[in-house]
Image (spheres, rainbow, N blue to C red):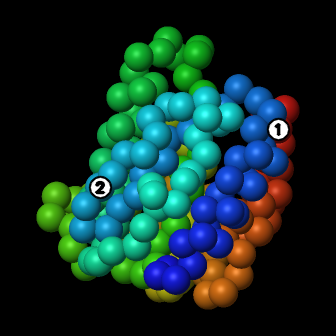
Amino acid sequence: MAGKEAEFIAEYNAFLLQNGRGDYNVTTVLFDDQYVLLYYCLPIGYAQLYPEQYYVRGACALYDAIGRTITTVNACHAQLTESKRPKTYLFIRTNGGDNASLTYTKKMIWEMLERQQQKCGWEIFFVGCDVQTALAAAPTHKGINGAEDSQDDDYFDILRRLLERRNFSKEE
C-alpha cells in the first residue's frame, strides 16, 4: 500500500462524504506492527482522514489489529443500552497475511468474527491483497459478509459493491 497513501485518503474521505447523511459513528484504526486508534465512535461527519494521520510502515499484525478493534468497538457498544446499539459494519483493508501478531491467533480471530456476526449482527467485510487466500484458511466463512481481492482496484469502489450486494442503504 506504500505509495498510494494520498489516493487512499481521498477515497476514504469521499466514501465518508457520500455516506455521511445519517446517524453513523466511525471507529478508524491504522495498524501494522503497531496499533493506532485514529477515531473512536466519532460521528461520521467528523472522521475525515488527513495525510499526517495515514502512513505505511512495516510488518502486519493483522490478527492483533482485528482483535483489538473488536474489543474497542464492543467497549463503545457496552456504554449503550441494547436498543441504542448501532448496526455495525467492520471493514478490514489489508495488504496480505499476518506476520507480526503477538496476542491473537488466526483461530481466535475467526471465532471472534463469527461470534460478532451471529450474536451481535455485525457485518464483516475484507478487502485487500490476497484476501481469498486468508479466507481459504478460515475454519468457516460464517461471519464474513463479503470479501474481494483489490490489486489495483479502488478500495472504496469495491466496498460500495460489497455493500450493494448486502442491500445496505443510508436509511438503515
- Badge 1 element: loop
- Badge 2 element: strand
Above-or-below relation of 13 to 130: above
Q: Residue 80, position in %: x, y?
A: 47, 15
State left or right for residue 160 relative to residue 47. Answer: right
Q: Residue 150, position in %: x, y?
A: 63, 81
- Packing grade of label 2 (10 A; few <14, some 14-19, many >=20) is some
Q: Residue 53, position in %: x, y?
A: 45, 55
Circle 1: residue type: Lys
Above-or-below relation of 73 to 81: below
Lower sequence index among marks 2 and 1 = 2
- For the view shown, which residue lies furthest in the front direction? 52
Tell me if residue 73 can be seen: yes
State left or right for residue 115 relative to residue 89. Answer: left
Residue position marked by numbered label 1 in the rendering:
170
Residue position marked by numbered label 2 in the rendering:
35
Above-or-below relation of 160 to 86: below
- Image depth: mark 2 or mark 1 in front: 2
Q: Quadrant of residue 24?
A: top right
The answer to whether the residues at label 2 and label 1 have Cβ atoms under 8 Å apart is no
Which residue is at the front of the view, 47 or 84?
47
